[in-house]
Image (cartoon, coloured by chain):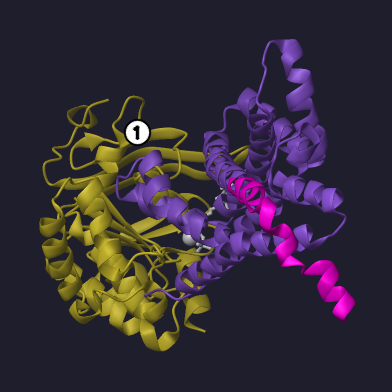
Amino acid sequence: MTVSERGRSTLEDSVVIRGLGKTFGSVEVLRNVNLDVKKGEAVVIVGSSGSGKSTCLRCINRLEEPTEGHIFVGGHEVTGKGVDLNALRRRIGMVFQSINLYPHKTALGNVTLALRKVAGLSKAEANEKGRRHLELVGLGQKADSYPAQLSGGQQQRVGIARAMALEPDVILFDEPTSALDPELVGEVLNVMVRTKELGMTMVVVTHEMQFAREVADRVVFMDHGVVLAEGTPEEILVAPEHPRIREFLTRTKS
Amino acid sequence: MDQIIRYFFDFPLMAAYWPDILRGFLITIQMSILTVVIGIPLGLLIAIVRLYGIRPLNILIIFYIDFFRSIPQLVLIVLAYFALPYFGLVLEPITATVMALAIVLSAFSEEIFWAGISSVAKGQWEAGRSTGLNFTQTLAYIVLPQVVRMSIPPLTNRAIGISKGTTLGSVVAVPELLNVTSSIQSNVANPTALTVGALLFLVLFLPFVRFTRWLERVYAHPR
Ligand SMILES: Nc1ncnc2c1ncn2[C@@H]1O[C@H](COP(=O)(O)OP(=O)(O)OP(=O)(O)O)[C@@H](O)[C@H]1O
Ligand SMILES: [Mg+2]
């Protein structure tokens, strides 16, 4: 299936998911998930634990192998055999709940590794670009610090810089603040807001409802492996029609 | 006391034997270094091959590791020297000893490297792969540097332990340090030669131990 075969024009679309299904053994984790993310849009996925948010996100860069459906990123199909996965993944940034900085590399080294080895920049070019992106997340001064010398919030900002430096079509955030002490959450969310303002396309799984309300262009509510509802933050998070969502919201507020 | 000194530290008595002792010492150094520079990289190589998860190969690897970790080094040296010729492979005593020890060291170091690789969080792989690095690049630039660091202390212990096995080369008549010094001892009926041998072993292994302690310290704290 090519992009045009799906019907609608897709030049505007950064991420297109059609009929995505995923099973782990006999357990169906995702069923017929459809999602369109336009360029520059921030889509927030919410839903209760185990509803398949992470799996959905990880199918987009194929850290999980979809069992059904098609996914396109920047007009290229991600799914299917014979795809140059490494070239594609370069165009899809990811920020992890567990941050996953390389502990043996400095903040700058974390950001520049893929710039050097994947994007093929020279050392000088990579360092220049790496520093620029560390500045962007407010960590220009910490370029030479090792992850162990940074706070959790600073580490995650380096994680964001690492993803941004490759100038991807989209960045996937999987609960980027869930592992952080509460007082460190704000600085990371602020960086994400700035990332959005820079025009980056973002798909964000988060439990930070205030962030979702203020930053999301669209909110997707997932439940038991399906997209139960999709709409503006207002529609999904403020005045949801669906009882499951209302139940979810009262649960997360407490 | 006097007697002890005369008995164990009668250095003048050694005068005639210094060239032999020195030659033995050099052979011990040579064998130890060869054992380490063959055994450890071979272990790393096997661990990396194992990582690619090719089923029949991995069964073979696990058999190799378990076999060479269980069999006594002495038996292996004897086999390498006396049995291999029946299969058309005639080895010098030194070569047979080094080969046996290096293989044993490779089995132990494979296990150490493998444990290291397994202990690197899955997220490290995912972080690397998500930026477009391929499997081999992720292994080389992200996983292995961490593995090597954490493997240094256990590898050091193994390497020293197995290098001391060079003394077992005496069963196939390698004129290594302990062999030389113990035959001098029986020739002159005075164990000073063994004292000299022990001191030289210290000279050989102590710097090695100190060096690796330093390495451990450097790696424990970045910068
Ligand atoms: N590797 C796996 N093998 C088997 N089952 C898995 C695997 N990964 C996830 N699952 C299952 O798939 C379902 C969806 O998991 P997923 O991690 O996508 O949920 P989630 O919405 O991200 O939840 P959370 O909010 O807790 O992160 C869960 O029931 C989970 O147990
Ligand atoms: Mg999750």
Q: Which amino acid does label 1 sit on?
A: Thr
User: Disc 1: which chain?
Assistant: A
Q: Which of B161 and A193 is in front in this view?
A: B161
Q: What element carries label 1?
A: loop
Q: In the rendering, what colour is chain A? A: yellow
Reading the image, the residue beneath label 1 is: A79
Q: Residue at position x 16%, y 75% from top?
A: A135
Determine if the magenta segment contains residue A127: no
Please state, as top left, top right, bottom left or bottom right, where the N terminus of chain A lies in the image.
top left
Q: In which quarter of the image is residue A44?
A: bottom left
Is most of the magenta stretch helix, strand or loop?
A: helix
Q: Residue B192 is drawn in which quadrant?
A: bottom right
Residue situated in front as seen by the camera: B151 or B104: B104
Q: Is mark 1 within 8 Å of ligand 1?
A: no
Horizontal and vertical percent for residue A89? 29, 44
What is the drawing colour of chain B?
Answer: purple
Start-end of magenta stretch: B1-26
Picture residue at 75% right of the left edge, 34% below the top? B173
Q: Name the quadrant where ligand 1 sits.
A: bottom right
Between A84 and B187, the one lying in front of the other is B187
Give percent across and percent down for residue A193.
21, 74
- Residue B82, how many percent across, how many down? 78, 22
Viewer can see residue B30 = yes
Residue situated in front as seen by the camera: A146 or B130: A146
The residue that appears at 23% across and 59% down in the rendered structure is A112
